[in-house]
Image: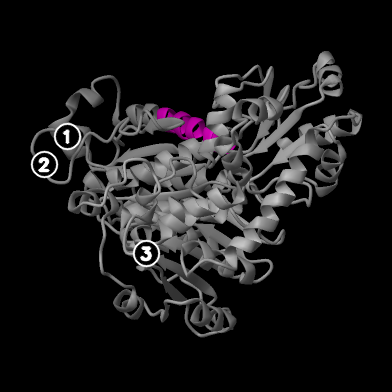
Amino acid sequence: MIHSSIPSAQLVVQHFKAKKIKNIVISPGSRNAPLIISFTEDPYFNCFSIVDERSAAFFALGMALQLQEPVATLCSSGSALLNYYPAIAEAYYSGIPLVIISADRPPYKIDVGDGQTIRQDHVFHRHIGYSANLKQDVSHCVSRVEKYAPQWLENGTVEENQDKVKAYNDSELNKALNVALQVKVPVHVNVPFEEPLYDRLEGPSTTALIVLPEAKEDENFLSGDMLDTWNAASRKMVLVGVNTPNSVEQQLLDKLAEDPSVIVMTETTSNLHHPRFFSSIDSIMAPIEKSASKEELFQKFQPDILLTFGGLVVSKKIKAFLRDYKPKRHWHVDEVKAFDTFFALTKHIRTSANNFLSNFIPKTKNVDSDYFGFWNARKVGYEVKRAEYLNQIAFSDFSAFKQIIDTVPKGSQVHLSNSSTVRYAQLFPLHPSLKVYCNRGTSGIDGSTSTAVGGSIYEQDPTLLITGDLSFFYDSNGLWNNYIKPDFRIILINNSGGGIFRILPGKEDTDNFETFFETSHHMNAAHLSAQFGFQHITVNNEEDLQKSLEKFYEKSDSPKILEVVTPRLLNNKILLGYFDFIS
């Protein structure tokens, strides 16, 4: 098997192999040639070539999301590395073990005017779990080391100093990769290389010292008074943010739903389902906000105990409510971290949601209460009114989303872009078989397409991306790769701009608003579709959308884009009108 002749490149590959990190997303370059050679020549690794580093990082993130394991990206030196930052920030706040590998120039060529050099060490220090800045080998190209960094060889022979370099690099690689595996956050490995970069060996010239992560035993997370407190409370709210599909046993959710003192509030990204769960949070919250007895209703809704798990929550309304009407106790369940989102956190339960619920729920008892009954009656009421409203409105984002969500094939993997797309999706129930993902760590629109493509690679069922126009055009390079499968589908809601800004406070009907907030445009996806080999269909009314959806998911030899054109100036009025109507 072929290896790079550079010892540190060999070490990196050996560590990744030992830690079972086998998916490597590579952005082509020259300085990273030693690592490209070492990874691509080893059949253990699955290597993917993505030219655009920003897209490559989100592609890797999508793959890590779907696999629930670390995925690595590899780039050359210089500004290439900085393009990883949006995906790194998303991974950091979403708890995704993205592993960043960057090739670097020798330290003595930084800040001296050499090409493609920046200060790569600790470049992500505010959004990274660990930065491993490896030392340059002194046994590779000794003549240049003697010329530019003779101090590296002052204490001992080349071999002795190389042993010190190897020991340091082994230690840093073990630390970084074990953090990715255990803490599930992004890590950065920066590797300086001196030329020549392309020399190869038939066998390795060095052997890594591997330290595997230690298995962590669950602590005793059930304190003595937790069950008593829970069983005594008549108003308990369970709020679930972003949650991996099939991560919680359904029988535990069924038991939780039986308790009349419990309300379970979920979102599309929660991937939890039960007829008694509240899956459209804003449809409950908005009528309270508009009610003449708002204060009384909010007090009636205020929980004694708030139990949360999963990642970040989409609904601004529930966050605002819980910050103003704080629970007496807020328990958050997560193996690693607990955000104090509502400024009321009283306990961090350090285990998985499934482990906590499987130990806790069987010991709880149902409590007589009208908490669920009262609010469930309101839920049933808005569901009836929603159906009435849909029968009387014009074609728009709102009605289009209802049609789209009703027709997604069972079992599909669904990726949602951010901004208005993920918010519209909250208003309608999804089939329990769907596996839903969205980049809610930083909630940016910048990598939704790339994430969905990466997430589709190892998914057996078809993948659907539902996206808005700005998100789609922003990340059009997400289609620039050779890994898009024929069953990949995109539904593009083109409302000619950032429609969400017409919903948010501050909307004005001025040229400045349309240019600098809404970003109105007249683009369509026809040419991009042709360029990247997608079938493309455009619809702009309810009847054509229904007909197109009937054929859209049929098997094909190429992926498809269904572009749904909706009225820019009407969408916000219909959405805001919905909340007025159900109130």
Task: Tell me whether circle 3 and circle 2 mark residues in contact (CB < 8 Å).
Answer: no
The percent coordinates of residue 300 (x first, y second) are 71, 27
In percent of width and height, residue 234 lies at: 82, 25
Q: In this view, does 467 lie above or below 276?
A: below
For the point 31% across and 41% down, the residue is 506
Residue numbers of the magenta segment: 167-181
511 or 439: nearer the eye? 511
Q: Position of residue 100 (x, y in %)?
A: 40, 43
In the picture of the structure, the residue carrying the numbered disc 3 is 495
Estimate how packed mark 3 is, as few (under 14), some (14 to 19) or many (20 or more) residues with alpha carbons within 10 Å. many
Q: Mark 1 and mark 3: span between their CA atoms?
A: 47 Å
Quarter of the view holding residue 130: top left
Which residue is tagged 2?
114
Residue drawn where x is 32% and y is 30% of the image: 122
Circle 2 residues within 10 Å: few <14, some 14–19, many ≥20: few
Q: What element carries label 2?
A: loop
Looking at marks 3 and 2 on the same chain, the residue that comes earlier in the sequence is marked by: 2
Q: What residue type is labelled 1?
A: Ile
Residue furthest top in the image: 225
Say above or below: 518 vs 257.
Answer: below
- Using the image, tell me which numbered label, if any, was put on residue 110: 1
| Amino acid type, residue under disc 2 in the picture | Asp
Which amino acid, by three-letter code, is at mark 3?
Asn
Q: Does the magenta stretch include residue 179?
A: yes
Q: Nearer the viewer, residue 392 or 512?
A: 392
Question: In the visual, does 112 lie left or right of 101?
Answer: left
CA–CA distance in space, label 1 to label 2: 7 Å
Please tell me whether residue 99 is drawn above or below residue 170 in the rendered image.
Answer: below
Image position, residue 409 (x, y; %): 65, 71
Relative depth, front residue between 142 and 539 = 539
Q: Is residue 119 above or below residue 508?
A: above
